[in-house]
Image (tube, grey):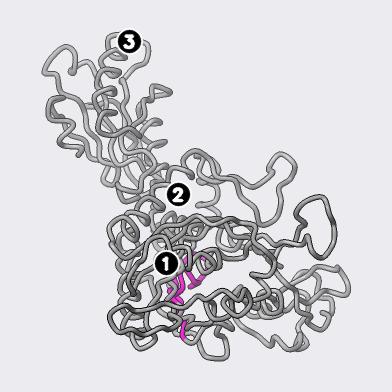
Amino acid sequence: MKHSEKKNADQENGSMEHIISLAKRRGFIFPGSDIYGGLSGTWDWGPLGVALKNNIKKLWWSRFVEARDDMFGVDAAILMNQKVWNATGHVANFSDPLVECTKCKKRFRADQLGSGDADVKSDAAGSGGKKCPDCGGALSEPKQFNMMFKTNIGAAQDDASVVYLRPETAQGMFVNFKNILDSLHPKLPFGMAQIGKAFRNEIAPRDFIFRTREFEQMEIEYFVHEKNWSEQFEIWRKEMHAWMLSLGLDAAKIHELDVPAEDLAHYSKKTIDFEYEFPFGKKELYGLAYRTDFDLKNHSEASRVDLSYFDEETKERFVPHVIEPTFGLDRTVLAVLCEAYCEDAMGSEVASGEKAEKTETRVFLKLPAHLAPVKVAVFPLLKNKPALVEKAREVFAEIRKVAPNAIFDDNGNIGKRYRRQDEIGTPFCVTIDFDTIEKDGTVTLRDRDTGSQKRIEISKLISEIS
């Protein structure tokens, strides 16, 4: 790639350093426990990050729960009886191969020591003669490290009081399968959906919010008859692609990986990973798994509670099989930010009607309007002119009737205000100037993506924005 082509690609997609810097500077995401030097693998969500994340959750819930007749929402507890994780094999199998440097004592995942790509698989059965990537020291032989966070419930500190922070949200739905059958009597096929936190004691968290120890999942368990699993799997594959397009992700940056049999999770018969081209490489964004009847069957045997389904029409009783679409919320936010990050060169903006004085690099988030944390920003041209401020407040009050997440900003010159809104992805800015109150009653409406401005009557402003 030529230098000029690489520069253009960097400007289009942004480096992770640029994106991380913007996220902190503009109140999207902060390092966890920041004033104490941070805590590896944890991140705090600021006001704009929370708004963006909530917009994604609302869109997901609306699409996959509220708009469907075959989906039931739940919110299961994070702490579960330890027997749940024994039944599913998590206590025995939810592990990663860990190696330790004999010199600097740092620990790494054996299957992620490779060519610099964090998820490139290497010899997990041994360190393969590889050296510590930090100090060059020799690495120990791998040992299995269980990634579940263990704690104790109640005052006792014995084996009976052990519980785990859930490493996935799925099991909260499986153990409630019978409750849904008994209370709502759904007909197959049907699904259960949940948005919630999960926790994994990652050996090497990395790449900003891509791989963390505390994260949020949007997950579905869709129950089907075994004979229909392939058909339903394909339906959900297409649904997941449609969802990614609704987020504004470029279809050309989305790739399917049919996970090889030797790499499948112990519960899966078929899994597709949906990978996205992040600035740090092509990585897993979502997963679609065919879990067979593994979970319901194991929970039924371990709990001695019948988790079968009786079909009233065919008079058949069977344990349903499961299709599982899994959406990582934190990775979704990261993909949306990476897709939206743009840089371009344009004239610095000043008051309407005046000429730009210089050219500068503009950073902006080209977020889809339905995801943007702030939809509209309203400015008085000058904050020391009461008439302008009063009129701007009037316009702001009208806009908030249809866009509650609009904001009012009178801090700094107009160019700086535009830049702030560009960086947080606000689609529209409305400026009230002297022409508004002295001449024609129009305001300036500015488009984020192009930077273009036009005069528009206040009476038409709401419909134009809508």
Q: Is residue 227 left or right of residue 433?
A: right
Helix, strand or loop for disc 1: helix
Q: Which residue is mark 3?
A: 385
- In the displayed structure, 63 sits above or below 100; it is above
The secondary structure that most of the magenta stretch takes on is: strand
Q: Please provide the residue range marked out in magenta.
A: 270-288
User: Percent position (x, y) of residue 195?
Assistant: 47, 56
Instruction: Identify the disc placed on residue 53.
Output: 2
Which residue, as the protein is rendered here, is positioned at the far right?
103
User: Percent position (x, y) of residue 329?
Assistant: 48, 58
Label whose residue precedes the other's in the sequence (3 or 1): 1
Helix, strand or loop for disc 2: helix
Q: Which residue is mark 1?
A: 181
Instruction: Identify the disc placed on residue 146.
Output: none
Q: Label 2 sits on what residue type?
A: Lys
Q: Is residue 349 left or right of residue 260?
A: left
Q: Label 3 sits on what residue type?
A: Lys
Q: Foreground: 406 or 22?
A: 406
User: Percent position (x, y) of residue 252?
Assistant: 33, 72
Please name the residue shown 19% across and 39% down the image: 466
User: Percent position (x, y) of residue 17?
Assistant: 55, 54
Which residue, as the protein is rendered here, is positioned at the far bottom?
261
Please name the residue shown 64% across and 69% down the image: 84
Residue 274 magenta-highlighted: yes
Label whose residue precedes the other's in the sequence (2 or 1): 2
> In the rendered image, which quarter is residue 94 located in?
bottom right
Q: Foreground: 450 or 359?
A: 450
Please name the residue shown 78% across and 87% down the image: 129
